[in-house]
Image: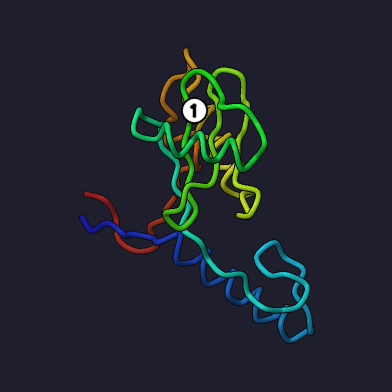
Amino acid sequence: MRRIAINRNAHQRDARKIELERQAERGGFRSRGMPRNGQPRIQQALSVRLANDGDREIIEQLAQLDSGAVPSGPLLFGTVDLSPAAVLSLGDGTVVADPFTPTLELLQLMRIRARQLEPGRGPVRRAALAPPLRIRRTTGRRA
């Protein structure tokens, strides 16, 4: 029996590429991926992890830049292109961020991760993320 593998991500990338080309032909971009001037945004590496004791000095510096207090309790630590950018308290949701670094997407990612780490919340099931693919056989019969 031969199995057919469908790469759904490749199909979605191709569809997105076609849509961007159509928008370019029409003379403007209005999607979240492109600003109004038509120049693509620079991709940045975002990372989120639990803060540890070694991050204390960096967290204090971020709090000082943000003119805020150091959040209490367990913390999520976020970086943009390997530079410390934001801290989110898992206890009360307090945020301290570098005011000179764009952190909107990073903070959205950090809030998603904080929800995943809430007590009593089980692991995310794969079935809840995407519906299963159904593949029809067009030739041959099963023996």
The N terminus sits in image quarter: bottom left
- Residue count near mark 1 (Cα–Cα under 10 Å), binned few <14, some 14–19, many ≥20: some
Residue 97 pos. (x, y %): 60, 42
Residue 121 versus residue 88 in the image, above or below: above
Q: What residue occupies the far top of the structure in this picture?
A: 120
Residue 89 versus residue 21 in the image, above or below: above
Q: How many marks?
A: 1
Give the residue displayed 73% in from the left and 70% down from the top: 35
Colour pattern of the rendering:
rainbow
- Could you tell whether 29 is left or right of 111 in the image? right
Quadrant of res 70? top right
Q: Between residue 119 and residue 24, name the one nearer to us.
A: 119
Residue under label 1 = 116
Give the residue displayed 62% in from the left and 33% down from the top: 95
Residue 128 pos. (x, y %): 50, 34
Name the kind of residue labelled 1 in the image. Gln
Residue 126 versus residue 46 in the image, above or below: above
Give the residue displayed 50% in from the left and 53% down from the top: 80
Residue 68 pos. (x, y %): 65, 31
- Secondary structure under badge 1? helix
Residue 84 pos. (x, y %): 47, 47
Give the residue displayed 53% in from the left and 47% down from the top: 85
Q: Between residue 61 and residue 87, name the one nearer to us.
A: 61
- Could you tell whether 19 is left or right of 140 in the image? right
